[in-house]
Image: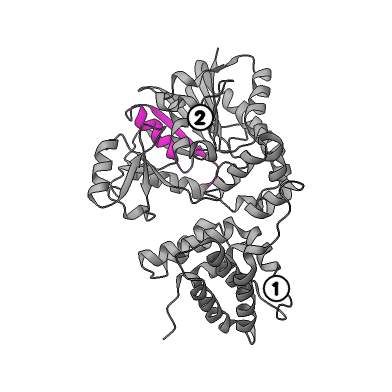
Amino acid sequence: MPAKKTARDLAVRALDLWQDGKGRPEDLVKDALDRSGLDTRDRALAMELFYGVIRNLSNLDFILSRFIKEPPKGVSDEVRDILRVAAYQVTYLDRIPAHAAVYEAVEQAKKKGKGTDRFVNGVLRAVLRGYKEIAYPDRGSAPSEFLSVKYSYPGWVAKRWLARLGFDEAEALMRAGNAVPPLTLRVNALKADRPGLIAMLEGSGVGCRPTKYAADGIVIEGYTQVRELPGYANGLFAVQDEAAQLVSILIAPNPGERLLDLCAAPGGKTCHMAALAGDKAEITASDISLDKIRLMKENIRRLGVRSAHVVQADAGAPTPFKGGFDAVLLDAPCSALGVVRRRPEVKYTRRENDIARLARLQAGMLANAAGLVRPGGRLVYAVCTTEPEEGERLIEGFLRANTGYSLDDPYKYMPESARELVTDKGYMRTYPHRHGTDGFFAARFVKR
């Protein structure tokens, strides 16, 4: 009978698949967990190890490189991942004794070839003895190199954020991006209210608290199995970050209006707009991906939304929709540098020239969206990024080219608790290190 897989086994295997390009991290780890038979505690540990290594990959490799002298011939990627997982446990976690982490890594290595266990044992014991004394690039004379290595961000991001934010804030933003994000829910107002759902969760032993900015938000404390939360199956809530909840509020939907949500998958904002309008608006939700459309339909069904219908469409091309919408929301594809804490793989897949490429795509999508709004209607543009080329600068260019539109002050639509998120130029801007939310940018326009 084969030995039962451990949380470490699962994390190493999922890391190996991710680096081979076999899928997105969230899909790989979900699939592995679904087939694992691990209990709740070990499932949480597997998630911690998997995402912890991805968040800190460059720093872990920097540490290991200081103690690997002569790796065995033909060392596999899986052995490197065994080392990375153990190094993460030793250098970042304190709930597992270091000697236990080393022992488990050596046991894993015994299955990977002759001498591999001795190699892994030697490297990890050297890490234990010396990792606290490692010399990093000097933060004074080489600040971008220090930040890049210490926080596992590409050098171009470090240079950008240093130039725009200064060292202290750039470091704080990177540190926040490497933190484990909270599980944030949005109460489905079609079926529940926040006090009632909080009471239900607390009555089931789930720690939670209201969000600071969003009126329907709840932060779950210390719980990760979303589908096991009371109320999930009944559609009492959706998983949605607090900043994303505020974007839908900027639309200010009303009963009877025609609304369009472009790039709508997985449907969180569509369903929120439906709830804000009492499920009495006429909402069209579109996306280019059939897989994402299937997920969106499932979310709409679970939440009990009846006022939305889903179509496949490319927001970057002439759309099949007739104009005259009362409001259009464009949550455009972007560099995703505002959601690194939820998608840490972005740090390794995004390139600096992607920002200009994406800004061109966003500008085209925004121009298409603008042509679908009726006179007197409104348009909301949103992206989950920190970069001004995809936010403030893009909007400035849009307004110069579209004189029939004017920027509308989001202050009057935001709940009082969230008005501090409105910038002096009239945009909504959030940062993980300042606000504890994902990093979002949003602008609201009115068509004259």
Q: Residue at x 68, y 32 (%)?
A: 389
User: Which residue in the structure is indicated by mark 1?
Assistant: 68
Q: Residue at x 46, y 68 (%)?
A: 96
Q: Secondary structure at mark 1?
A: loop
Residue 365 sits above or below residue 424 on the image: below
Viewer-closest of 319 and 10: 10
Residue 340 seen in the figure: no
What is the span of residues highlighted in magenta in the rendered image? Answer: 266-289
Viewer-closest of 154 and 235: 154
Q: Residue at x 55, y 16 (%)?
A: 447
Q: Position of residue 183 (x, y in %)?
A: 41, 47
Sequence-first disc among 1 and 2: 1
**Quadrant position of the N terminus in the picture:** bottom left
User: Which residue in the structure is indicated by mark 2?
Assistant: 329
Q: Secondary structure at mark 2?
A: strand
Q: Residue 71's quadrant in the figure?
A: bottom right
Viewer-closest of 363 and 172: 172
| Type of the residue with mark 1 | Ile
